[in-house]
Amino acid sequence: MLKTTSNGTQVATVIKFSYKPTAETLADLSRPIDPRHLKTRKQGTATLTYCPWNTIARHLHHRAPGWCWEVQSVQEVGGSVVVTGRLTIPTADGDLLHYSAVASEPLESTSKAPAAEVAASSCLRIAAALAGLGLELWG
């Protein structure tokens, strides 16, 4: 992160995280997401409730400080984009919690966003759910 000083120069600042113990991290991730942070959309005749990827990221910042998301691969398979990713969460106990996920999106999707973006955001949401965050939305 860059910070601008009073004389106009930019100085890099170090961000320190206060990691939580593994049990506390997992308990925090398992707390339901407040309904005011959720959105709904129509898909065919169904109405789906979901949590946008950027809201998932904000919850991870608060519940799992120091988290890291890595897109491991993006491939085109049979008319779809397939994204594989891994969510890593460090804990105060020295553990690194890893959650891997795969998501796909048709290349000819009705979404306004590029198929790779849609698949990557879905992949993050799935990995976060595997960690417990927003798991209640997948019932």
Image: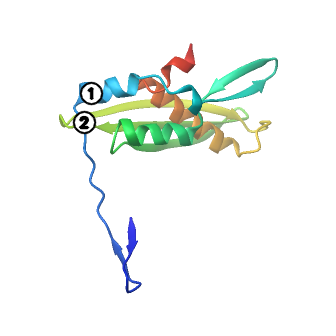
The vertical placement of 22 against 73, above or below, is: above
Query: Cα distance, mark 2 to mark 1?
Result: 6 Å
Q: Quadrant of the N terminus?
A: bottom left
Quadrant in the picture for residue 91: top left
Q: Position of residue 15 (x, y in %)?
A: 30, 57
Instruction: From the viewer's side, name the closer residue of 111 and 136.
Output: 136
Taking 47 as reference, is 69 left or right? left
Tell me the amino acid under the disc marked 1: Glu
* Residue to which mark 1 is pinned: 24
Instruction: From the viewer's side, name the closer residue of 47 and 37.
Output: 37
The vertical placement of 66 against 49, above or below, is: below
Tell me the amino acid under the disc marked 2: Lys
Q: Position of residue 45 (x, y in %)?
A: 82, 17
* Label 2: few (<14), some (14–19) or many (≥20) C-alpha neighbours in 10 Å: some
Residue located 33% across and 37% down the image? 89
* Label 1: few (<14), some (14–19) or many (≥20) C-alpha neighbours in 10 Å: some
Instruction: From the viewer's side, name the closer residue of 95 and 48.
Output: 48
Asked if the residues shown at circle 2 and circle 1 are in contact, with their CB atoms under 8 angstroms apart, the answer is: yes
Q: Position of residue 123 (x, y in %)?
A: 54, 34
Residue located 49% across and 43% down the image? 71
* Residue to which mark 2 is pinned: 20
Instruction: From the viewer's side, name the closer residue of 9 and 7.
Output: 7
